[in-house]
Every structure is written in C-alpha cells, then in structure tokens.
Amino acid sequence: CIMDEFANLGKIPDWEKAISTIRSREISASIILQSMAQLRNIYDKAADIISDNCDTFIFLGGKGKDTLKEVSEILGKETIDTSTTSDTRGNSPSHAMNYQKIGRELLTPDEVSRLNGNKCIVQIRGVNPFFSDKYDITKHKNYKYLSDYNKKLRFDIKKEMSGKAAIRKEDVCELYHIDTMTA
C-alpha cells in the first residue's frame, strides 16, 4: 500500500492496530507525509504506534521543528575529541592543554533543516541512517506517462464528477461476468 498524502486520507479507524497486523502478514504500508505533526494531529497518541510500525523512514527535507528534532534524534550522536589550550603570561607564565571526548548530535535540528535539496536521509530498521541522492524522476523510462511531462495526462476531478469526461479509446475495456457457482 503506497499511501501518498496520508494526512489527506482522513483518519482510518484502528489504523494503529491494522498496520501492525498487516506487517505480520508481510503486507507493506508506505505512509508518506509532509511532517510528523500531520500524523500526530490526526492520530494523537496512536501516532507513535503507527510510526513504530514503519521499518523505513525517509526524510526528504522540511522545516517543522518537531520533525527536525526527531530526525536529529534518529541520526544519533557521535563522539568527538576536543582540546583546549591556555597560556598565562606575566610574572609566572603557565601553559596548559586539556583533551576530552564529548558527545555531539551527528546533525543538529538546524543542520537537518539545511539538508541539500538533492539529498535525503534514509533510516531502515537495523541499519545505520545514511544520506542518499534523491531519484531524478525525469530519468525514468516511464516519465512520459506522468502529467508532469504531459499536461494532457492530468486527472481533472471536476470534469470527471460532472460526467462530461470524454471516453477515450484507451479507457474502454470489456467487462466479463464469470459465474463460479455450479449447478
């Protein structure tokens, strides 16, 4: 199930239970959101359960404060070495060097917000998070079938709902009824 613009679907009853059940039956659900706040807004406390049942997290960019903080936390910390020196001059000069190891976020929320537009952050369960290049959809062999390429392919919901949509040859199909009942 590829659920793009998941927040616009409205609340799916008991989705937090359904997503964990379908996973156990090897059915995937790809929930695509603009921000984690959308999920929390619709599902409230169940948002964390839903998120926890998604094995892959892909951050394409954004500026929601909570989402940026969450991405920073997902990335984790690293240990860095720091050194400080101090020189005192005067009647009794002294020199001191201090080395220490400190923890630092791999990317702070403000650094996450400045992610290069051609990159994304991918975190798959059981694998360290990594940067990846975003796929250039214009390079795909079927790009010509998208409305981004050809405006005539754009779906016009108002036209469809008014019943004035023209039936094109490629839209016509044959319908068969197969009776599986035996006498």
Image: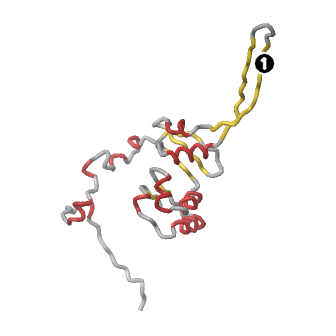
Q: Is residue 87 above or below residue 36?
A: above
> Where does the image place residue 42, in percent across and percent down from the top left?
46, 61
Furthest toward the front, the residue is 91
Between 44 and 32, the one nearer to me in the picture: 44
Q: Which residue is mark 1?
A: 96
Q: How is the image coloured?
A: secondary structure
Question: From the image, which quarter does the C terminus lie in?
Answer: bottom left
Furthest toward the right, the residue is 92
Q: Is residue 9 left or right of residue 161?
A: right
Q: Is residue 148 visible?
A: yes
Please report the residue visible at 37 percent of the width from the left and 48 percent of the height from the top: 142
Furthest toward the bottom, the residue is 183
Q: Secondary structure at mark 1?
A: strand
Please report the residue visible at 41 percent of the width from the left and 62 percent of the height from the top: 9
Q: Is residue 119 left or right of residue 89?
A: left
Which quadrant of the structure image shows residue 71?
Answer: top right
Between 174 and 49, the one nearer to me in the picture: 49
Q: Is residue 168 visible?
A: no
Q: Is residue 132 left or right of residue 82?
A: left
Three-letter amino acid code of the residue under disc 1: Ala
Q: Is residue 157 above or below residue 174?
A: above
Which quadrant of the structure image shows residue 173?
Answer: bottom left
Judge the density around disc 1: few (<14), some (14-19), many (≥20) Cα neighbours within 10 Å. Answer: few
Please report the residue visible at 58 percent of the width from the left and 64 percent of the height from the top: 23
Q: Is residue 72 above or below residue 49?
A: above
> Where does the image place residue 36, in percent across and percent down from the top left?
50, 52
Please report the residue visible at 60 percent of the width from the left and 66 percent of the height from the top: 24
Between 114 and 95, the one nearer to me in the picture: 95
Which quadrant of the structure image shows residue 90?
Answer: top right
